[in-house]
Image (tube, rainbow, N blue to C red):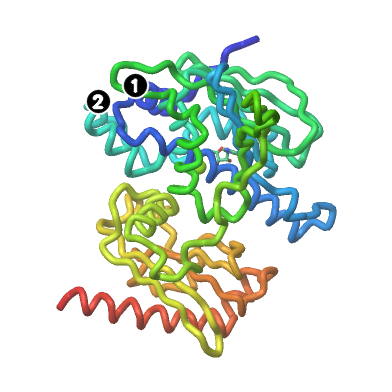
Amino acid sequence: MAIRQFKSESKKLLDMMINSIYTHKEIYLRELISNASDAIDKLYYLSLSDENIKFDREKFYIRISLDKDARKIVITDTGIGMTKEELENNLGTIAKSGSFDFKASNEKKEDVDIIGQFGVGFYSAFMVSDKISVTTRSIDSSDAYLWESEGVDGYTITDATKDEVGTEIVLHIKEDTEEDNYSKYLEEYELKSLVKKYSDYIAFPITMEVKHDRMIDEEKKEYEEFYETETLNSMVPIWKKNKSDITDEDYNNFYMDKFSDFDNPIKVIHSSVEGMCSYKSLLFIPSHAPYDFFTQNYEKGLSLYSNGVLIMDKCPDLLPDYFAFVRGVVDSEDLSLNISREILQESNNVKLIAKNIEGKIRRELEDMLK
Ligand code: ADP
Ligand code: MG
């Protein structure tokens, strides 16, 4: 079985992850869960245009299971999966290679900055794992593949079997060191609290088999263990919650996760508007320009949802060019789910929302100026 080499930039990133002194290693879970959620979203998009794909909400979930003795965490999703080529391209190279400049990153301190600023995605799992196995089957294929890697030495891709479309990721958790306690990630309560902290709003259920005890003999005080599937996230998007139930930390965590920024925003604008077109919006003014702001790759826009379901990741029509730096989401029940790009542009509702939002941002910025 031939070992394949990572592309050179990926190799540097991996090396950084493996030897990382980054203190927020826990973000690996958020990264893997958001990939799983993206993969389910992609399948959902496909189902809109392909009658053969049924999107039955019940069947879509992200499952976490634990094997403490084997030091394993397994994250399974029922998303779109990957073909062999996609495995090779997506996990053998950094997706966002344009955002990295490794020339200046020999210093440990700068490594930490890079990890925080760009949200390093899949490879962040190497901060806590000494081996990762990914078994995946694409919606486009009846074959499944296993990608495995123990780090910088490379990875292998071999044939595998998998009954369902989707992806299963097995993390083999590192042994504890003097500086780092990795074993905590094998504790149920730790994983539960990480899901709550970073991934509560994810639109699909994140489930875990949770161990319980029940007494089977009262006199002998005998217990038996049983497992129950729990859904860990509330699935209520943060912008739909009451402001009074949201802490600054909730806003900041959501912002940093969704928009891959290490710094808190300097301003959060959360509004709920009732009227001709009702909507909720949650906007953020970043504290610094996004890393790719001055490049051609930068796309302005707000994420557009129809009642909690993503319609478009970056809808440019919602922001004028001079507010291109604003990040955020808009959710309206008055927009249809199956709306196409062209119709969106013409939509009076979208125009109305855009006009309101522009005024709102302007007023907030003027207030800040004062
Ligand atoms: P990003 O999510 O920003 O693209 P990642 O490093 O997190 O970067 O993931 C790289 C790519 O690997 C993703 O874009 C996606 O194509 C693929 N991928 C990762 N995890 C999954 C998954 N669970 N299901 C399907 N594809 C995945
Ligand atoms: Mg990702």
Quadrant including the C terminus: bottom left
Q: Residue furthest right?
A: 52
Based on the displayed image, in which of its 4 quarters is residue 63 positioned?
top right
Q: Position of residue 347 (x, y in %)?
A: 59, 81
What residue is pinned by disc 1? 19
Q: Position of residue 42 (x, y in %)?
A: 65, 51
Q: Nearer the viewer, residue 22 or 324?
A: 22
Classify mark 1: helix, strand or loop.
loop
Gap between marks 2 and 1, in whole Å? 12 Å
Q: Residue furthest top?
A: 1
Decide which of tag 2 and tag 1 comes sooner along the chain: 1
Residue at 25% in and 25% down: 106
Classify mark 2: helix, strand or loop.
loop
Q: Label 1 is placed on what type of residue?
A: Asn
Q: Position of residue 55 (x, y in %)?
A: 76, 55
Q: Residue 346: which disc?
A: none
Q: Label 2 is placed on what type of residue?
A: Asn
Residue 103 lies, with reference to residue 77, above or below; the image says above
Q: Position of residue 155 (x, y in %)?
A: 55, 18
Residue 85 shows up from this direction: no
What residue is pinned by disc 2? 106
Q: Nearer the viewer, residue 171 or 247?
A: 247
